Image (cartoon, rainbow, N blue to C red):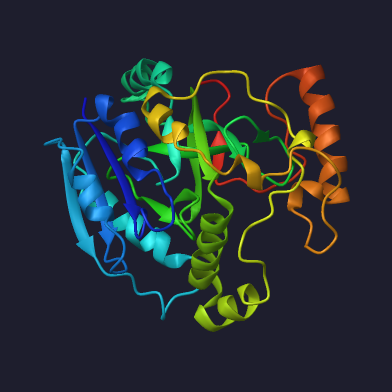
Amino acid sequence: MKISGFSMVRNATKLYYPIQKAIESILPICDEFVIAIGEGDKDDNTRELVSNIGSDKIRIIDTVWDIENQRNGMVHSEQSNIALDACSGDWCFYIQADEVVHEKYLPVIKDRCLELKDDNDVEGLVFDYRHFWGDYDHYQISHGWYKREVRVIKNNIGVRSNKSAQGFKRYGERVKAAHSNAEIFHYGWVRPPKYMENKRRAFHTIHWGKDQSNNFHDQEPQEFDYGPLDRLPVYNGTHPEVMQDWIAKMNWQDKLQYSGEPKNNRVKHKHEKIKNRILTSIEQKLERKFGGKIYLSGHRNYQLLGNK
């Protein structure tokens, strides 16, 4: 059995993406790792950073992002599929530039790949998600955040990265997935507030176009406001070992709000909105009563095979 890791990225160092940590977190169980690196701005050194990992498993594909002619984040799936098409493994493990896997899950994931390699009902593996917010001690459980997503897929069966590369589809249909029994640590919302605002501007440019994004963000503060963190659950577990030096760099604690009321001069975050707060409370009660992940919405990129 062969496992190919793959990813795509652009301007990772400029936008504070832990791409090196993402790759290193799954590299031990990958036979190869393919990454499409888009040509970045002159003040970014993403390609050098990835090269400096120094593994002969890693293969870089240099690309140019066609942002002007795309909307809705389609360039993300395009770039993901460029890397996917270069993978030769039986399984392909997709890791985004702000996602990291804890080392305790690596043997679990590999065992699931071995177990299900010849099971034709299974097209992919779905992972639980832990979305950190503001710092490395708080995370989201809000209804507005996706709780699971497919990150490992079988190769050469028609599975493609979908839309803005959040998930995958097979011939336009949801991927039939077994649970990986593992979790993804998502650090996309843990950045210094200035970097967080820059990342949002870049993200909105890809989805809305440059003019609309600039018009919106020119009215926004220069630094992102995470809001009061004491309204979120506290994480008491360990972070992946590869993240330790990255976490040690955190120096924006004085810019965070750890208690009090949200500021009135900004749009509410989705976890602060009344509808999501009510739905979150209901989901949490149902999960405590019945166990597992409870969704009060229909959005999913996968069909979970409960008997697998």
Image x and y of residue 234, in percent = 69, 26
Where does the image place residue 238, in percent across and percent down from the top left? 52, 19
Residue 199 to residue 232: above or below: below
State which quadrant residue 190 falls in.
top right
Camera-side residue: 153 or 250?
A: 250
| Nearer the observer, 304 or 218 | 218
Mark yes or no: residue 28 visible: yes
Pick the quarter of the image with the N terminus. top left
In the depicted structure, whether residue 230 falls above or below residue 87: above
Q: Residue furthest bottom?
A: 211
Residue at left 47%, top 33%? 247
Does residue 50 appear left or right of residue 243 in this picture? left
In this rendering, does residue 72 appear at all?
A: no
Farthest residue, direction left: 56
At horizontal 80% and vertical 28% (from top left) the residue drawn is 284
Q: Is 53 positioned to the left or the right of 16 in the image?
A: left
Residue 9 x/y as whole percent? 34, 55
Query: Which of the 4 quarters of the picture holds residue 233?
Result: top right
Q: Position of residue 251 (x, y in %)?
A: 52, 41
Most foreground residue, 283 or 55: 55
The image shows residue 198, relative to residue 57, as above or below, that is below
